[in-house]
Image: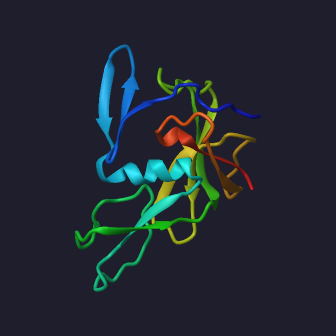
Amino acid sequence: MSINWPTTTLETWSTEPLGVKNPKTWAHFHSYGGWGRFFQGLQQRKLLATRCSNPNCGEKRLWLPPRCQCPDCWHDMDWVEAPQIGNVFTWSVIKYPGELFKLPADTPLISVELEGVCTKLMSWLKEGRPQIGMKVKAVFNTERPTNSILDLAWAPA
């Protein structure tokens, strides 16, 4: 099975911080604030995570989705590139995707485990059938970016 990228393109109204117009049946203007760099990284085929900048913080974990402040000590976070190859930790199927996303019903939704990242990243499987433990690689929508998490998908590695 192969699934095409969503067809909706979100118009940007600000680049710093990244802000997008989210078209529904009415316009919703949304700012990504401190997380805009993550979505801009997707357009550059980069998977950006955050790590605590405090040298005294005992944990040097990567957080993905990124965090603006360390959940342990509240210091600012540094941006670092995360691995782009991981494993399917678990999966489900989208039966009723929302209006904006335009993904077909039965699209595999996967939770990806990445080395060094302390969280699991939810995304969708663009190609193939998911299996727990399956090795996957990041695939980026740079042709018609949506400026949303849908610009990141995964395919068998």
Name the image colouring: rainbow
Instruction: Name the one closer to the observer, 78 or 96.
Output: 78
Is residue 32 depicted above or below 112 in this figure? above
The residue drawn where x is 73% and y is 41% is 129
Instruction: Name the one closer to the observer, 92 or 145.
Output: 145
Is residue 45 depicted above or below 153 in this figure? below
Side of 31 relative to 147 (left or right): left
The residue drawn where x is 33% and y is 16% is 26
Labels in figure, total: 0
Q: Which quarter shows the C terminus?
A: bottom right
Whole-percent x, y for residue 135 in the image: 71, 58
Residue farthest to the left, as pictured: 74
Whole-percent x, y for residue 84 in the image: 62, 60
Residue farthest to the bottom, as pictured: 56
Instruction: Name the one closer to the observer, 99 or 29.
Output: 29
Side of 37 relative to 157 (left or right): left
Side of 58 relative to 93 (left or right): left
The residue drawn where x is 57% and y is 64% is 114
Whole-percent x, y for residue 3 in the image: 69, 32
Instruction: Name the one closer to the observer, 125 or 147.
Output: 147
Q: Which quarter shows the N terminus?
A: top right
Q: Which quadrant holds residue 67?
A: bottom left
Q: Which quadrant holds residue 7?
A: top right
The residue drawn where x is 47% and y is 20% is 99
Whole-percent x, y for residue 110 in the image: 58, 46
Is residue 31 depicted above or below 88 in this figure? above
